[in-house]
Amino acid sequence: MRLLHTMLRVGDLEKSLAFYTEVLGMKLLRREEYPDGKFTLAFVGYGDESANTVLELTHNWETNRYEGGGGYGHIAVAVDDAAAACERIRQRGGNVVREAGPMMHGTVVIAFVEDPDGYKVELIECD
């Protein structure tokens, strides 16, 4: 396993991209539009996603502001098999809050588990 990304919800994607790229010196690695879900994902970081943990900026088109604490999303971890990882986590006493399956509006297989404080950890099936 390896840490993939941390997701933050942002109210103004262009301002956020300008901050992370121009102010902090990150690179825009990829940007994906999901019209059916009315959201955009932008991934920024200091190196290629295949070898580095990055930041996912999520812009929900109909939301332009979040209250403190509401902008935090989840931590993501790569796994070979999301369903098998859920089973291992469950056997070890972990709480699976979303079983393995394709993400909404996409095809990537994901699952979510919850830590003792209620923070979500996304398991992303990667080759």
Image (cartoon, rainbow, N blue to C red):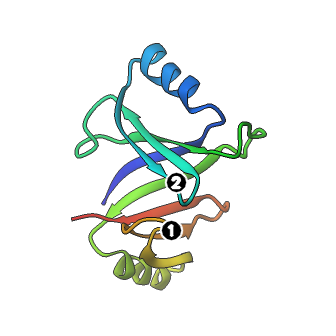
Q: Residues within 10 Å of mark 2 (few under 14, many from 20)?
A: few
Residue that appears at 35% across and 82% down: 84
Q: Quadrant of the C terminus?
A: bottom left
Q: Amino acid at mark 2?
A: Pro
The image shows a total of numbered marks equal to 2
Return the mark for residue 93.
Answer: none
Q: Is residue 16 above or below residue 86?
A: above
Q: Which residue is mark 1?
A: 104
33 horizontally vs 30: left or right: right
Q: Position of residue 4 (x, y in %)?
A: 36, 50
Kind of residue indicated by mark 1: Met
Label 2 with label 1: CB-CB less than 8 Å? no
Q: Position of residue 34 (x, y in %)?
A: 48, 54
Residue 15 visible (yes or no): yes
Instruction: Please name the residue shown 23% across and 46% down the image.
Output: 50
- Image quarter for residue 85? bottom left
Real-space Cα distance between discs 2 and 1? 12 Å
Local SS, label 2: loop
Disc with the residue nearer the chain's start (2 vs 1): 2
Q: Residue sitting at 74 percent across and 37 percent down?
A: 65
Q: Where does residue 68 sit, x and y in percent of width and height?
A: 76, 38
Describe residue 34's horizontal placement relative to residue 62 as left or right. left
